[in-house]
Amino acid sequence: MTTTLEADVDWKRVCTVDEIPILGSRVVNSPAHGAIAVFRNGDGEVFALRDRCPHKAGPLSQGIVHGKTVTCPLHSWKIQLEDGQAVAPDVGCTKHFPCKVEDGAVFLQL
């Protein structure tokens, strides 16, 4: 049986939950991954995606968050926050980053 211990995963603290507006986002920069948009939905859940729509590279961080999706501000593509996949009929995806919240701090797996 193989298990992955959380201690083996490289988690980076990026901000506090309070620094992400409800139904909004905060952009953090990673030398290896570029701009990453960290979102908080109306239920307080936190998600992280590359800040680039798969359609025309629009800034997802400037989109509208609704439920577990964000709508790109350029051409209204809807992107799922849980996995970065475009919602049908659109096709494409942007990189998703696992994230967690501990003691009010947001961590990304990079």
Image (cartoon, grey):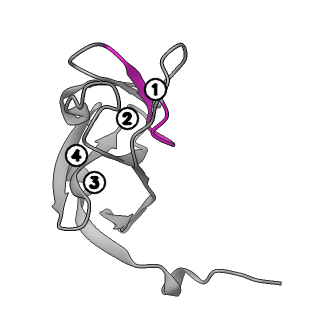
Identify the amino acid type marked 1.
Gly
Identify the amino acid type marked 3.
Val
Residue topped by disc 1: 67
Identify the amino acid type marked 4.
Ile
Task: Determine if the magenta segment contains residue 82.
Answer: yes
Residue stretch rendered in magenta on the structure: 76-85
Q: CA distance from mark 4 to mark 2?
A: 10 Å
| Residue contact at pointers 4 and 3, CB within 8 angstroms | yes
- In the rendered image, residue 23, in percent from the top left (x then y), is placed at 29, 30
Q: CA distance from mark 4 to mark 3?
A: 6 Å
- In the rendered image, residue 7, in percent from the top left (x then y), is placed at 50, 86
Residue topped by disc 2: 41
Give whichever of discs 3 and 1 has the lower sequence position: 3
Give whichever of discs 2 and 3 has the lower sequence position: 3
Q: Residue at 55% x, 17% y: name it.
A: 88
Q: CA distance from mark 4 to mark 1?
A: 16 Å
Q: Secondary structure at mark 4?
A: loop
Q: CA distance from mark 2 to mark 3?
A: 11 Å
| Residue contact at pointers 2 and 1, CB within 8 angstroms | yes
Residue topped by disc 3: 17
| Residue contact at pointers 3 and 1, CB within 8 angstroms | no
Give whichever of discs 4 and 1 has the lower sequence position: 4
Give whichever of discs 4 and 2 has the lower sequence position: 4
- Within-10-Å neighbours for mark 2: few <14, some 14–19, many 20+: many
Q: CA distance from mark 3 to mark 1?
A: 17 Å
* Res. 4 image quadrant: bottom right
Q: Residue at 76% x, 83% y: name it.
A: 2
Q: Residue at 31% x, 42% y: name it.
A: 39
Q: Secondary structure at mark 1?
A: loop
Residue topped by disc 4: 20
